[in-house]
Image (cartoon, helix red, strand yellow):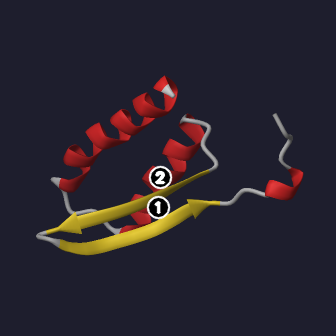
Amino acid sequence: MKNIFLKFLFLTCLAPTITLAQISSPQIDSLVAVALLKFKLVGAAVAVVKDGKVIHSKGYGLADICNTPQK
Protein backbone atom coordinates (compact mmCIF):
# COMPACT_ATOMS: atom_id res chain seq x y z
CA MET A 1 0.00 0.00 0.00
CA LYS A 2 2.81 2.40 0.87
CA ASN A 3 4.45 1.72 -2.50
CA ILE A 4 1.26 2.60 -4.39
CA PHE A 5 0.90 5.82 -2.40
CA LEU A 6 4.49 6.82 -3.24
CA LYS A 7 3.89 6.20 -6.94
CA PHE A 8 0.73 8.30 -6.84
CA LEU A 9 2.53 11.05 -4.97
CA PHE A 10 5.38 11.09 -7.50
CA LEU A 11 3.03 11.37 -10.46
CA THR A 12 1.02 14.05 -8.70
CA CYS A 13 4.18 16.05 -8.07
CA LEU A 14 5.04 15.88 -11.76
CA ALA A 15 1.69 17.33 -12.83
CA PRO A 16 2.34 20.98 -11.87
CA THR A 17 5.64 21.11 -13.77
CA ILE A 18 4.12 19.49 -16.83
CA THR A 19 1.05 21.73 -16.92
CA LEU A 20 3.09 24.95 -16.89
CA ALA A 21 4.19 24.30 -20.46
CA GLN A 22 2.07 23.64 -23.51
CA ILE A 23 2.03 19.88 -23.89
CA SER A 24 0.47 17.80 -26.63
CA SER A 25 -1.38 14.49 -26.38
CA PRO A 26 1.55 12.57 -27.92
CA GLN A 27 3.87 14.10 -25.32
CA ILE A 28 1.50 13.01 -22.54
CA ASP A 29 1.40 9.52 -24.05
CA SER A 30 5.20 9.43 -24.01
CA LEU A 31 5.41 10.60 -20.39
CA VAL A 32 2.89 7.99 -19.28
CA ALA A 33 4.72 5.24 -21.17
CA VAL A 34 7.95 6.15 -19.36
CA ALA A 35 6.16 6.25 -15.99
CA LEU A 36 4.55 2.83 -16.59
CA LEU A 37 7.96 1.31 -17.29
CA LYS A 38 9.74 3.12 -14.46
CA PHE A 39 7.19 2.14 -11.83
CA LYS A 40 6.52 -1.32 -13.33
CA LEU A 41 2.81 -0.65 -13.68
CA VAL A 42 0.45 -2.46 -16.04
CA GLY A 43 -1.85 0.50 -16.56
CA ALA A 44 -2.95 3.97 -15.61
CA ALA A 45 -5.73 6.46 -16.27
CA VAL A 46 -4.81 10.06 -16.94
CA ALA A 47 -6.97 13.16 -17.20
CA VAL A 48 -5.64 16.67 -17.80
CA VAL A 49 -7.95 19.52 -16.80
CA LYS A 50 -7.40 23.13 -17.78
CA ASP A 51 -9.70 25.95 -16.72
CA GLY A 52 -12.28 23.40 -15.53
CA LYS A 53 -12.39 21.54 -18.85
CA VAL A 54 -10.94 18.12 -19.62
CA ILE A 55 -8.44 18.61 -22.44
CA HIS A 56 -6.99 15.09 -22.40
CA SER A 57 -8.22 11.81 -20.96
CA LYS A 58 -6.99 8.34 -21.77
CA GLY A 59 -6.44 4.91 -20.28
CA TYR A 60 -3.07 3.23 -20.76
CA GLY A 61 -2.01 -0.39 -20.50
CA LEU A 62 -3.55 -3.80 -20.83
CA ALA A 63 -3.48 -6.82 -18.58
CA ASP A 64 -4.36 -10.39 -19.54
CA ILE A 65 -6.11 -11.60 -16.40
CA CYS A 66 -6.46 -15.10 -17.84
CA ASN A 67 -2.69 -15.61 -17.79
CA THR A 68 -1.90 -13.68 -14.62
CA PRO A 69 -0.42 -15.89 -11.88
CA GLN A 70 -2.63 -16.18 -8.81
CA LYS A 71 -1.25 -15.15 -5.42
| In front of the other: 57 or 66 | 66
Pinpoint residue 59: horizontal percent, then vertical percent. Answer: 51, 65
- With 68 as the anchor, is 26 left or right in this view? left
| In front of the other: 38 or 59 | 59
**Helix, strand or loop at disc 1?**
helix
Q: Residue furthest top?
A: 2
- With 24 as the anchor, is 26 left or right in this view? right
| In front of the other: 34 or 69 | 69
Pinpoint residue 25: horizontal percent, then vertical percent. Answer: 38, 69
- The residue at 41%/28% (across/down) is 6
Contact, CB < 8 Å: mark 2 with mark 1? yes
- The residue at 41%/60% (across/down) is 46
- The residue at 20%/46% (across/down) is 16
- Residue 1, relative to residue 41: is it above or below? above
- The residue at 55%/45% (across/down) is 36
Give the amino acid at mark 2. Answer: Val
- With 10 as the anchor, is 50 left or right in this view? left
**Helix, strand or loop at disc 2?**
helix
Indicate the quadrant containing the C terminus: top left, top right, bottom left or bottom right.
top right
- Residue 21, relative to residue 10: is it above or below? below
Q: Which residue is mark 2?
A: 32
- Residue 53, relative to residue 67: is it above or below? below
Which quadrant of the figure has residue 27?
bottom left
Q: Which residue is mark 1?
A: 29
Give the amino acid at mark 1. Answer: Asp
Category of crowding for the residue at label 1, using alpha-carbon neighbours closer than 10 angstroms: few (below 14), some (14–19), many (at least 20) = some
Pinpoint residue 35: horizontal percent, then vertical percent. Answer: 49, 43
Pinpoint residue 54: horizontal percent, then vertical percent. Answer: 26, 73
Which quadrant of the figure has residue 65?
bottom right
Alpha-carbon span between mark 2 and mark 1 = 5 Å
Category of crowding for the residue at label 2, using alpha-carbon neighbours closer than 10 angstroms: few (below 14), some (14–19), many (at least 20) = many
Q: Which mark is residue 68?
A: none
